[in-house]
Amino acid sequence: MTLTASIAAPHPAAVAAARAAWAEGGNALDLAVAAATALAVVYPHQCSLGGDLVALVREPDGAVRAIVSTGAAPQRVDVDALRAAGERMPSAGPHPVTVPGVLAGWAAVLDHGAALPLAAHVRRAATLAREGSPVSSGLAWAIGYRADGIAADPGLREVFAPGGTPLTEGDPLLQPRLAETLDAIADGGPAALYGGAIGAALAAGLEQAGSAMRLDDLAAHDVELTEPLTADALGATWHVAPPPTQGATLLALLAQIDADARAAAAAAPAAAAPDAPATPAPAPLSLDRARAASAARDRLLGDPRVSQIDLDGLRLASAAAAPAPAAFNGARPHGDTVAVTAVDSDGRAVTLIQSVYQTFGAGLLEPTTGIVLHNRGSAFSLLPGHPGALAPGARPPHTLCPALVETADGTVVALGCQGGRAQPQVLAQLAADVTDPASDLPRAIARGRWVVGARDMDRAQETVLAEPGAAHAPESEAADAGVAFERLDAFTGLAGHVQAARLSPDGSQHAAAAPRADGAALTLTTDDETEATPS
C-alpha cells in the first residue's frame, strides 16, 4: 500500500528534516515536528527552544484536538514594580520572558500517534546546530534589523555576530551550545528542561539577568490538551485553539463573511436557484468587522485559568460585545512566528505554530544553553482588572492562530501563518480559496491581501495596508471610518507568511509554502517524492 504525506514549512532545512523523518517511517505528525525542531535551529529570530507552541491535530478517526503549550509568568513576578515602571510591559530584557512551552508542545503533538520518538527529531536538530546551516535571507534581514540588540547581549553576539561582525546571508550558522542542549534533551526528554539540568542552567542564567523565573516555574509547566473552538462557515467546519490564543477572533471574521455570502445568495434572482452552488460565493472581509474583532480581542482576551473570558464577546456574538477600536497596549510582535502544516493519506492533519514573538524575542540568548528566549510576556496588560493582566502563573494573550478545516465533501486543510495580531485577518481572506479542492493552493496563498492595525504595524495611527493585487481592499470604507489607507508597491511580512496542506476527498494532496519567506513544500510517498508547486 502506497502512503502519502505533504508538508509546508518556511525554510528548506525544515522540509529536508521532514523528508528525513518520512524516510525513517514517520507520518504527518513526525513531519511537522521534524520541521519544527529544525526551524528552532535555523530560524532562531522567529522560533526557538525558548518560545511557545500552539497546534491542532486531526487523528485518522476524525477527532480534532487543540494543543496549547504557552508558558506562564513566573510565580515571583513583581507586578507592582512593573506597573510603577511604566504603562506597558517591557518589550525586551528579562521581564517579558515567560516559561517556554515549545518543547512540551512537540512531545504533545507526537503523543497523538506519531511513528517516531521525540529523541529522533531532537537529535536531527542537534546535528544541524552542530554542523551549521547557511544563514537564510530572512535571518540575515533579522540580524541587521536587531543589530544593536545583538551587539548588546553577549549570548546573541557570540552566535550571530562572532568577533563583532554580524553574519550575512550564506554565512555558516554554528550553535554548539544549542547542539549540546538538544543532545541532553534527546537523552533526558522534556524533563531535562522542565525541572532537569538544562532547566536549572536556563533558570540560573535568567535569574542572573534579572528575571523572576526559577526552576520551579519551568517544572510547573503543563500542556493544555483540549477541545478546539469550532464554527461552521463557508461550507466548512473550522477548528481553532481556545483562549489565551486569538482563535475566536478568526471565527468572528468568518461569521461575517459567511453571513454576507448567504445574504447575497438569498438576494440573487430566483431563476439562478436551481443551478446555485450549495455553498454561497464568498463575500469580502469588512473593515468594520476586522476592526471590531481586533478591539474585542484587545479588551477581552486573557488566560481562562486565571480570568473569566467572554467568548461570546470575542466572537462578536452580540452587539454589546463589539466595542470601538482600542489602542493596542502590548509590544509590537513584528510577525516573528513560523507555521508548519502537514497531512497524510491516513487522514492525519496537523497545523503547528511556534514563536519567540518579536524578532529574537526578548533579545536574550542564555549562553550556557544556547537558547534564545521569547518575550511573549510583553503581551500582558498592566491594567488592573484586564482579562490579560499580568499575574503570577498567568499565560499572556497569544497571537498564534492555527486553523484546521473540514469541508462537507471531506476535504481537510491544515492552515497557519505568521503575521502577529493580523493572523485572523489573513486567514479569513484566504478561507474560501484554500478550502476549495479545485483551487490552486500556491496561488491562493500568494495573492495580495490587506491588513489593518496601528502600533503593531509601525504606524502612528490606525492604517489599512493593501498589498499589490489585494482583492476588495477597503479604501472607501477606510475613508468613511477615518482610517488611513496605504497601497503598497510590494508584499509585506505584516500580511503574513502562510503555510497550507490539503487532503482532498479523492486522496490527492497539495501543500504550499509562503512565497514571502524562505519556505518550500513537498508531497512525499513511500515510493518516491515529488516537490509541490515551487514557492
Image (cartoon, grey):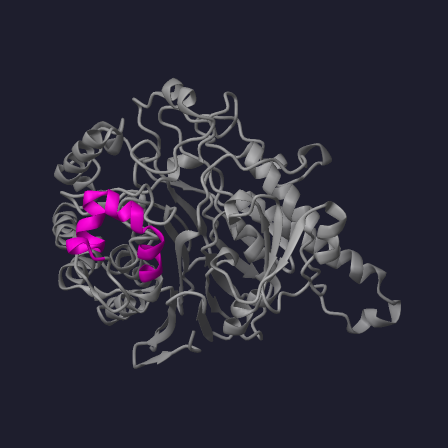
Q: Is residue 95 left or right of residue 120?
A: right
Q: Is residue 144 magenta?
A: yes
Across and down, in percent, residue 176 comes to 12, 54
Name the residue furthest right. Answer: 270
Across and down, in percent, residue 415 comes to 48, 59
Q: Is residue 167 left or right of residue 247?
A: left
Across and down, in percent, residue 23 comes to 24, 72
* Magenta segment, prevailing SS (helix, strand or loop): helix
The magenta segment: 139-165
Q: Is residue 438 magenta?
A: no
- Quarter-of-image position of residue 314: top right
For residue 314, say whether it is visible.
no
**Residue shown at the point (32%, 53%) measured from the top left:** 45
- Quarter-of-image position of residue 95: top left
Query: Is 426 above or below relative to 244?
Result: below
**Residue shown at the point (15%, 48%) measured from the top left:** 181
**Residue shown at the point (35%, 34%) measured from the top left:** 96
